[in-house]
Amino acid sequence: MKMQRDFEIRAAVVEDVPVILELIRELATYERAPNEVTATEEQLVEVLFGEKPVAEVLLAFEGKSPVGFAVFFLNFSTWLGRPGLYLEDLFVKPENRGKGYGRALLIELAKIARERDCGRMEWAVLDWNEPAIKFYRALGAKPMEEWTVFRLTRDRITRLAETEQE
């Protein structure tokens, strides 16, 4: 989807995997966790473009330079009986913020959600990321203050899976 001259939002293709991984690393640095990225290009090829893709990526470009991305997948709402679009990551390079890339990515995601008959779009944001919180509120998004995100890491998943049922 062309926004204006030298401004493009498009679905990623397998050749974009090195760009995607670099943006993931830049996001991790922004989120104060630069050493926590363990993803490899090979893993990303498999999970994004393999036999059973589990997520999709939109890329934002200024001219030919990648400036941001959105990683998303469909989830399911039992209450709505419909799929939802879950935005795993939205990132625009700091030097490119304020130019409309984040908004353009979210608009494109909303179009995808509408086309796929999703009942909602959801995402998480770090508590300290006030610029993002302000941005999302300005778009009409509301925080789900009654909900707490829980996580099992890979080692905890293994431990739980190996537990005998009582």
Image (cartoon, grey):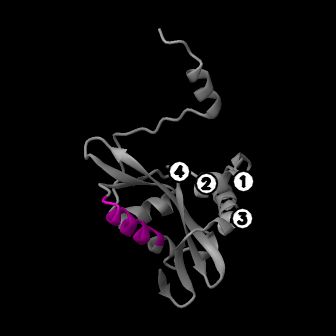
Q: Nearer the viewer, mark 4 or mark 3?
A: 4
* Label 2 to label 3: alpha-carbon separation: 16 Å
Q: Which residue is mark 2?
A: 50
Q: Nearer the viewer, residue 61 or 146?
A: 61
Q: Residues within 10 Å of mark 4 (few under 14, many from 20)?
A: few
User: Mark 1 Cα within 10 Å, few/some/many (few <14, many 20+)?
Assistant: few
Residue under pointer 1: 42
Which badge, 3 or 1, is on the more N-terminal residue? 3
Type of amino acid under label 4: Val
Q: Which residue is mark 3?
A: 18
Q: Mark 2, mark 1: which one is toward the viewer?
A: 2
* Magenta extent: 105-117
Q: Which mark is residue 54?
A: 4
**SS assignment at label 3:** helix
**Gap in Å between the C-alphas at discs 2 and 4?**
9 Å
Q: Tag 4, which secondary structure?
A: loop
Question: Residue at 39% across / 66% down in the picture?
Answer: 112
